[in-house]
Amino acid sequence: MPKTTAKNATQFGWRPLAAAVAMLALAGCGGFNGREEALYTPENVHPITVSKDTATLKLDAAMDLGYLNGRQKAQIASFARAYTERGHGPMVVSVPDRSLNKGAASDFLNDVSRALADEGVTDDRVVYKPYQVAGDKNSAPVVMTFNRYVAQASPCGDWSANYSYNPKNLNPPNFGCATQNNLAAMVADPSDLVHPRTMDPADADRRSTVLEKYRKGESTATQRSDSDSAAVSEVK
């Protein structure tokens, strides 16, 4: 067995440290090259921005009608559903005040109110107000608006990077862009990206039922009927 000297011990002691330093150096080639490279992610390169927008629907009010036609009722129904899904604040219905079709536009309001109520948008969520138009204008529309949020990511298509030469192992400029744009398009309500929604109130009745069954030692699970059962198909 070779004799261990102070010189040999020092050499042996440095070997694990040198190996660790080499491993860290190799790990550095894996993509983490400082704060700038660490922030080079799809979320930072292609951020999703959320902005306020105004949805608008204009309804022609002909002087000889004074009521909604079938196409306009369908438009209001679609507009009301969009308001229910993404609207924030009241829906505003603006009626022309000085146009020659002022009377017909005012007659529209009853039909508009009924069409909105059919889609669950009641009058307590609607604000009716006049707007000024030129006195010599023959016809002016009834304008319906509501505020909403719109999410949008940066445009895609940056293929400027040289894929054959990437010594820092960084993501190319277009990496993750499509995913970010798809996410922005799929968010049910972009306002959720700005601030969280408030929680719904707790179901006190259900909570009391569960606690009572727990105290009695009974099952707290919801009872299922035969129609709720399911079986895996064994098609071969």
Image (cartoon, grey):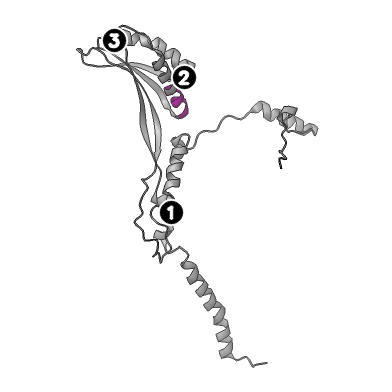
Provide residue 16's location: percent of width, then percent of height. 56, 78
* Badge number at residue 121: 2
Q: Residue at x 45, y 63 (%)?
A: 32
N-terminal of the two: label 2 or label 1?
Answer: 1
Provide residue 134's location: percent of width, then percent of height. 21, 15
Task: List the single residue furthest toward the left.
Answer: 136
User: Nearest the camera: 99 or 131?
Assistant: 99
Provide residue 193's location: percent of width, then percent of height. 45, 40
**Rendered position, 84 above or below 236:** above
Provide residue 133's location: percent of width, then percent of height. 24, 16
* Badge number at residue 41: 1
Magenta stretch: residue 223 in it? no
**Rendered position, 33 above or below 175:** below
Looking at the picture, which amino acid does disc 3 mark? Lys
- Judged left or right of residue 212, residue 59 is left
Mark 2 and mark 1: span between their CA atoms? 42 Å
Looking at the picture, which amino acid does disc 2 mark? Val
Looking at the picture, which amino acid does disc 1 mark? Thr
Mark 1 and mark 3: span between their CA atoms? 56 Å
Mark 3 and mark 2: span between their CA atoms? 24 Å
N-terminal of the two: label 1 or label 3?
Answer: 1
Task: List the single residue furthest toward the right.
Answer: 217
Residue beneath disc 3: 102
- Do we see residue 225 in this rendering? no
| Image quarter in which the C terminus is found | top right
